[in-house]
Structures are given as structure tokens and as C-alpha cells.
Image (cartoon, grey):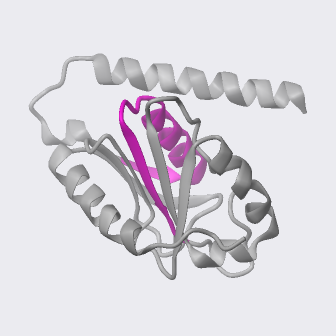
Amino acid sequence: LADQADRVEDTSRLVADLFARYYDAPHGDDPFDYVELIRNSEAAWARRDAITAGAEKEVAQARKLPPPGVAPRAGDEVGVREGVRYRCLHERGFLAHARFRARLAERERRGEEIRFVPEVAVSMCVVDRRKCLLSLNRTGVVSGQGSWLVLEHPALASMLTDAFEVAWELAEPAQP
């Protein structure tokens, strides 16, 4: 189990390094250089991890529940680094899942801020008001096929962060 955890950690670092190199490369004038469509959940989670690994100031996430009868994805938290604010807005229904509740206090101790709302409009992850990963799925996808859009568009990412801020102010912490 420890070897598997080490491999996952090594893979995450490798993916983050590859994406960092991608973003350091010169950009073209083609608007599609800034748009990426992902069709597989594991690739979407890896892309989210890579985007958040490059965060300098903030990571804002919103999470929709998976379909009824499906448990939330294990290990959905991001790697928290000092100097970066991490906030995640979940639908209140996440609290019905014991495994999710069991990890909540640890996530908050590590520095993640977590709040709850009755419903999340769209699952998303926005980093530093410049990059975003948007789920195009009706519910949270835990595994398998789906559709996600990655955009490097500061104006759109900033607008999404502003919308996140409004929802964040209305959200509540988990009840003990």
C-alpha cells in the first residue's frame, strides 16, 4: 500500500512537472492553444492536480455530488502549500457519506477551507483567477467517461472566481 501511495505521489509530481513545462513554452496566437477538452475522469483529476500544483495565491473549487448510489471520490483533496489559500465548496449532500465526513477535519487541519451549500451550479476548479477546469457533467463524475473543459482565460477565470465568492459568502461550515 505504501509503494502504491509512493507511485501515485511520483506520478502526480511528474504530471505537474510536465504541465509546468507546457505552460512555460511560448504561446501561439491560436485561441485553441488555451482550450483543452478531457473525456476521462482520471485524466481530469490528474489535470486538476497539475493545475493546482502551480497555484501561487489561491485555489477555489466547487463540487457537485456524484449520482445517487455512488460514493464521492476518495482522495479528492488537493496538495496544500503554505502561502496558497485553498477553498472548496461542496453540496451539502456530501455530508451524508461517512468516508467524506471522516476526512473533513484532517483536510481543514491541513489548511483547506471547506463550506457547504444546498446545490453547486457547476463543478469547477479555478487557480489564481487565470486557469480553470470546468465539469460539463450533470453530476459529479467519480470514475469513467465524462467531459471537462480546461481553459487558460484570466477574464473567464476571474468571473468564475467572483461567482464562487458570492456562493462562498452564503455557504456554511459543516455542523459538528
Q: Locate the N terminus and report the quarter of the image it occupies.
A: top right
* Residue 74 seen in the current view: no
Judging depth in this view, the residue of 105 and 123 nearest the camera is 105
Q: Quadrant of residue 26?
A: top left
Residue 71, x across and y down, in percent: 74, 68
Residue 133, x across and y down, in percent: 39, 50
85 relative position to 142: left or right: left
Depicted 30 relative to depicted 136: above or below:
above
Residue sitting at the far right:
1
Rendered residue at 65%/58% (across/down): 143
Depicted 140 relative to depicted 144: above or below:
below
Residue sitting at the far left:
29
Rendered residue at 48%/19% (across/down): 17
Residue 65, x across and y down, in percent: 59, 72
**Number of numbered tags placed on the structure image:** 0
38 in the magenta segment = yes
Residue 121, x across and y down, in percent: 39, 75
Judging depth in this view, the residue of 117 and 19 nearest the camera is 117
149 in the magenta segment = no
12 relative position to 56: left or right: right
Judging depth in this view, the residue of 136 and 74 nearest the camera is 74
Rendered residue at 72%/70% (across/down): 176
Q: Quadrant of residue 110?
A: top right
Rendered residue at 53%/53% (across/down): 113
* Residue 37 seen in the current view: yes
Boundaries of the magenta span: 37-64
